[in-house]
Image (cartoon, grey):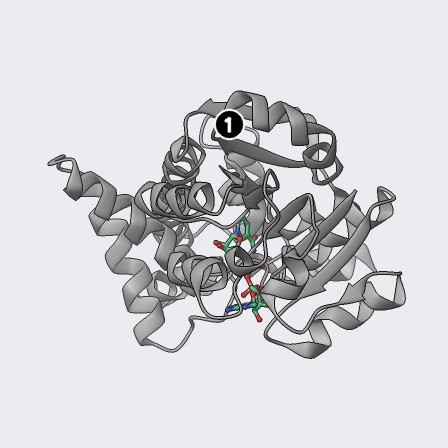
Amino acid sequence: MKIGFIGLGNMGQHMARHVLEGGHDLTVFDLTRDAGRPLEEAGATWANSPAEAARDAEIVFTSLPLPANVLEVATGEGGVLSAISPGAVFVDLSTIDPDTAVTLDAAVRAAGAHALDSPVSGGTGGADRGDLCLMVGGDREVFERVTPVLNLIGDGEKLVYCGGIGTGSICKLANNLVGLSTGVIISEAFGMAMKAGVDARTLYDVITASSGDSAALRGWESSILEGNFEPGFMVDLAAKDVGLATQLGRSLGLPMEAANIAQQRFIEAQRRGWGRDATPAIARIQEERAGVEFRFPESDSESED
Ligand code: NAD
């Protein structure tokens, strides 16, 4: 198939690569020219605009930071919808709010094409391995038509049809609210236990073997516990996701006290200038309060040598 892919960042570069390796004719675009080079070397074609990436494509993917970026790339000047073919499928892989997904769907339909909201979960590791979870909203028949291509970037077992347009985004916001607010409580647990005298390795081993285990804590193993804040998944994007979840709750008239407390922690991390660090960087706020650093003991790395 001829496929367009727009947004070649931490996630998109890997997902686009899997589409290309699946044997498809891939055209790519990103605001950053260099983001496309490895894909070009692997056989993809560079486009000079979203419209060029979408021209004659049967599927157009976007993986972009914010809802506003997705709307701009779709409906702006030189955007996807100025060139999309009738009957083509626009699959947005970004994490956006369901209202934006519905707005996008209406614009895509007006252009004679189909839209799916298909946010992903599994981080850059899952994107690299091609075993992401994809949660998909839109017409089931359209979903089934593009399933073979979605399976290139996700693990078939974790490809979930969620319902009508916007439902993928609702599921994604719910999932990330759980994962990201768990990180806030983990930082409080580490602050408490380490200040009281237990080292990070002991605590990590105990919790990962116990009822407090979580993907969020597992994600700490190669990041904050090793003093590594390379993203991965940036604080700015996490703050966006928790913000979209609390905004959705508010629009439903639904109090979500804990989610709003978690959101404040992300806003504080951004205020401190850590927006482009990996998400576990928010725990540094609690490190300061506790007066300890959440790091594995030096003896850990020595014993591995
Ligand atoms: P990123 O910032 O690394 O990549 C985004 C890319 O989009 C960048 O290369 C940027 O240059 C490009 N871009 C921005 N605006 C553009 C525009 N107008 N036209 C063309 N390109 C544009 O972000 P990411 O981590 O790859 O995340 C992408 C999306 O996936 C986000 O919505 C994020 O919330 C979601 N997500 C990320 C992760 C993760 O672990 N990083 C996991 C799941 C979901």
Q: Which image quadrant for residue 121?
A: top right
Tell me the quarter of the image containing the C terminus: bottom right
149 left or right, relative to 143: right
58 left or right, relative to 233: right
On the question of residue 286 being in view, the answer is yes
Q: Amino acid at mark 1?
A: Ser
Spot occupied by residue 114 in the image (x, y as percentages of width and height): 52, 38
The quadrant where ligand 1 appears is bottom right
27 left or right, relative to 103: right
Front-most of residues 261 and 170: 170
Give the secondary structure at mark 1.
loop
Q: Residue at x 42, y 53 (%)?
A: 194
Spot occupied by residue 34 in the image (x, y as percentages of width and height): 72, 77
Spot occupied by residue 209 in the image (x, y as percentages of width and height): 57, 29
279 is higher (above) or lower (below) than 23: below
28 is higher (above) or lower (below) than 180: below
Q: Residue at x 44, y 60 (%)?
A: 75
Residue with the mark numbered 1: 210
